[in-house]
């Protein structure tokens, strides 16, 4: 039997910086490779598979550098070396973890057997990767991607984002105990698309929370939205959904990765 391997960028411990579990102690497993190019992406170093990955040293020493691909056993050791306690999250993030669904599923299965919670962060378009996932996740954080925010919309692979997100969400609620949709709002956000997002959520499961995440200046985005604009979007979402929240990214404020 072949040993699963993955292209990883890093494994490290930090506080969750986004979404409804913000602040929760979390071990992050960052996968290498992403097929989108969001204009505000803060992790462009993850777009291409990485030659090497870094494992955070639990004693605070220099990161240990490993060449890719990394076997499953080494990924698990890197996670458990960081001392997660039962109930803590392990975030499978990227990059896009579902482009390496075999490894994402294998990591999730094992850590769940040890009482940890698997939190998948995904761009929400790789329906085929989600279908190949063996086993369950505790939480799936599905980004809603706007075609106007993505530089290469890879049209052959994802011809229509909204339809693909709907299909993804339908499958996600079967695979995870908790699912939420995260949508980065910027000066390109439109009411038409908000209607589309809310329609999909209400069609799939009205209890799914929508997290409005104000864009953080990065990449091709230079400025923030004003508070009154952000609250305006929250008000609009609240009129259409059962559960809408406005949660900014906290890791840039704290200075954590
Ligand atoms: S999906 Fe995530 S990693 Fe990929 S380009 Fe967008 S923000 Fe960056």
Image (cartoon, rainbow, N blue to C red):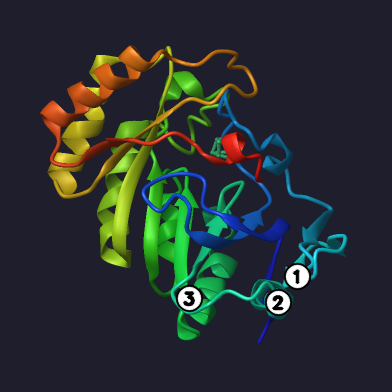
Residue 102: quadrant of the picture: bottom right
Residue 12, x across and y down, in percent = 68, 60
Residue 68: quadrant of the picture: bottom right
Q: Earlier in the sequence, mark 2 or mark 3?
A: 2
Q: Quadrant of the N terminus?
A: bottom right
Mark 2 neighbour class, 10 Å CA radius: few under 14, some 14 to 19, many 20 or more: some
Q: Is residue 207 above or below residue 174?
A: above
Residue at 47% in and 79% down = 86
Quarter, ligand 1: top right
Ligand 1 neighbours mark 2 (CB distance < 8 Å): no
Q: Which residue is mark 3?
A: 116
Q: Which residue is mark 2?
A: 81
Q: Are marks 1 and 2 in contact (CB under 8 Å)?
A: yes
Q: Earlier in the sequence, mark 1 or mark 3?
A: 1
Left or right: residue 52 versus residue 165 is right
Residue at 17% in and 33% down = 199
Q: Secondary structure at mark 3?
A: loop
Q: Which residue is mark 1?
A: 58
Q: Secondary structure at mark 1?
A: loop
Q: Are marks 1 and 3 in contact (CB under 8 Å)?
A: no
Residue at 50% in and 16% down = 224
Q: Secondary structure at mark 2?
A: helix
Q: Nearer the viewer, residue 161 or 75?
A: 75
Considering every residue shown, the one lying at the far front of the view is 254
Residue 97, x across and y down, in percent = 56, 55
**Closer mark to the observer between disc 1 and disc 3:** 1
């Amino acid at each position: 039997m072949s040993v699963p391997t993955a292209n990883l960028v890093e494994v490290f411990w930090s506080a969750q910086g986004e979404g409804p579990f913000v602040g929760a102690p979390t071990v992050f497993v960052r996968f290498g490779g992403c097929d989108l190019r969001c204009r505000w992406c803060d992790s462009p170093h993850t777009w291409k598979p990485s030659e090497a990955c870094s494992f955070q040293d639990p004693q605070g020493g220099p990161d240990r550098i490993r060449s890719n691909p990394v076997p499953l056993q080494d990924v698990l050791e890197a996670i458990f070396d960081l001392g997660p306690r039962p109930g803590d999250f392990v975030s499978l993030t990227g990059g896009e973890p579902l482009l390496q669904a075999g490894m994402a599923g294998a990591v999730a299965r094992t850590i769940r057997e040890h009482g940890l919670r698997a939190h998948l962060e995904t761009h929400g378009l790789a329906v085929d990767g989600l279908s190949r996932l063996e086993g369950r996740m505790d939480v799936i954080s599905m980004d809603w991607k706007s075609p106007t925010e993505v530089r290469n919309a890879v049209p052959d692979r994802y011809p229509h984002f909204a339809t693909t997100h709907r299909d993804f969400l339908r499958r996600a609620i079967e695979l995870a105990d908790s699912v939420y949709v995260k949508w980065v709002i910027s000066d390109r956000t439109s009411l038409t698309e908000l209607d589309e997002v809310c329609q999909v959520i209400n069609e799939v499961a009205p209890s799914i929370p929508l997290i409005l995440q104000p864009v953080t200046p990065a990449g091709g985005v230079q400025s923030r939205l004003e508070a009154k604009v952000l609250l305006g979007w929250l008000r609009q979402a609240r009129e259409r959904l059962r559960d809408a929240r406005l949660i900014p990214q906290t890791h840039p404020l704290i200075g954590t990765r």
